[in-house]
Amino acid sequence: MPKMKTKKTFAKRVKVTGTGKLARHHNFTSHFAANKTHKQKVQLRKAGLVSQSDYKRDKALLQG
């Protein structure tokens, strides 16, 4: 069976942390900012982690 290739589009959107978790950016940040509170906008700037339910599938996309 051939080697699995890394899904490059996914690799550009996710970063593997030092402990092996997957960091990602939040959505809902690009427009309609006037409708969001300052607190929402500040918290959306920070990176989030991929949820446990998606972790196994997302890790397979990075194998390569």
Image: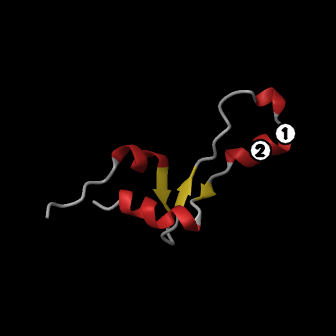
Residue 17 seen in this snapshot: no
Disc marking residue 38: 1
Q: Residue at x 77, y 44 (%)?
A: 42
Query: Dot 1: within a 10 Å radius of its alpha carbon, few (fewer than 14), some, or many (20 or more) residues?
Result: few
Query: What's the amino acid at mark 2?
Result: Val
Q: Is residue 54 above or below residue 40?
A: below
Q: Residue at x 84, y 39 (%)?
A: 38
> As drawn, is 27 to the left or to the right of 38?
left
Instruction: Give SS at disc 2.
Output: helix
Instruction: Give SS at disc 1.
Output: helix
Query: What's the amino acid at mark 1?
Result: His
Disc marking residue 42: 2
Q: Quadrant of residue 36?
A: top right
> As drawn, is 62 to the left or to the right of 37?
left
Q: Nearer the viewer, residue 64 or 16?
A: 64
> As drawn, is 33 to the left or to the right of 28?
right
* Quadrant location of the N terminus in the rendered image: bottom left
* Quadrant location of the C terminus in the rendered image: bottom left
Disc marking residue 14: none
Q: Residue at x 52, y 67 (%)?
A: 21
Q: CA distance from mark 1 to mark 2?
A: 6 Å
- Where residue 12 sits in the image (x, y, percent)? 43, 45
Do callouts 1 and 2 mark residues in contact (Cβ within 8 Å)? yes
- Where residue 62 sits in the image (x, y, percent)? 36, 58
- Where residue 29 sits in the image (x, y, percent)? 67, 36
